[in-house]
Image (tube, rainbow, N blue to C red):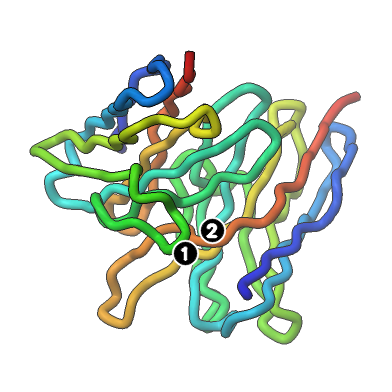
Amino acid sequence: SYELTQPSSVSVSPGQTARITCSGDTLPKQYAYWYQQKPGQAPRLVIFKDNERPSGIPDRFSGSSSGTSVTLTISGVQPEDEADYYCQSADNNISMFGGGTKLTVL
Amino acid sequence: EVHLEQSGAEAKKPGESLRISCQASGYQFTSSWIGWVRQMPGKGLEWMGAVYPGDSDTTYSPTFQGQVTISADKSVNTAYLHWNSLKVSDTAVYYCARRLYDNDGFYLGMDSWGQGTLLTVSS
C-alpha cells in the first residue's frame, strides 16, 4: 500500500497565500486531486490532474507538482476558504486520500 | 445537472446487515464509476471502493476488501454499499461520488457527491 501525507493544519490571515502540501511515492507517476470539505458538507473537487480547476472554482485556487509532492495554493485567502482539504491520488486503480489539512483563516 | 441522492440515516445493532443506496440522475449512469468514501466521526476521508454500473465491475481498497460489498443496478440508476454483519466501528458517514473520466480515459476526479448517509451502530 502507499500513503499520502499532509500537514494536519495550516493557518493564514485573510488576503495571504495558503499552501498545503501532499507527499507520496506515487505522485511522480500519478495525478493528484484536491477536495475541500466544510463542516457538515460533502467534499467538493477544487483541483484535478495536479493543476486544473473545475468550472465554478475561483481562480485563487491552484495546484502544482514537483517530484513526490504536490501543493494546493490558495492566493488571497477568503474567510469562506476555511475548511478541511484532502489530496487524492491512485495506484493500480486503487484511490487513496491524504489525512487532510485543516485550513484556519485567522 | 448531475445529482446523487443517498438513502437516509440508519441506526443498527452489531451483527445486523444493511444496504445503503445512491441513486444517480442527470447523466448516463452506466458510463461512469461510482465510488464510496467513509468518514468516521471527526476523521478524514477514506476511499472504500467503486463500481462501474455498465458491467458491474468493482474495485476495492485493501482495507475494505471483504468487509463490504459494492454493487449497482442499472435498471434503477442506483449504486449500493452492503454489510453482512455490522460492527460498532462501522459508525460513520458514507458518501457516494461519481468518478469522472475524459474521453481518453484520464481520471478527472470525483466531481459530484451525494449528501452522505450517517450510519450509527450501537448495542
Q: Residues within 10 Å of mark 2 (few under 14, many from 20)?
A: many
Residue depicted at x 57% and y 84%: B28
The quarter of the displayed image where residue A103 is located: top left
What secondary structure is marked by label 1?
strand
Most extreme residue toward the left is A67
What secondary structure is marked by label 2?
strand
Residue tagged 2: B35
**Amino acid at dot 2:** Gly
Residue depicted at x 70% and y 62%: B80
**Mark 2 vs mark 1: which is more N-terminal?**
2
Disc 2: host chain:
B
- Residue B97 visible in the snapshot: yes
Residue tagged 1: B99
- Where residue A3 appears, as percent x and y from the top left, is 31, 32
For the residues labelled 2 and 1, the Cα–Cα distance comes to: 6 Å
Q: Nearer the viewer, residue B39 or B89?
A: B39
Judged left or right of residue B107, residue B80 is: right
Vertical relation: A23 (above or below) B9: above
Mark 2 or 1, closer to the camera: 1
- Where residue B25 appears, as percent x and y from the top left, is 68, 77
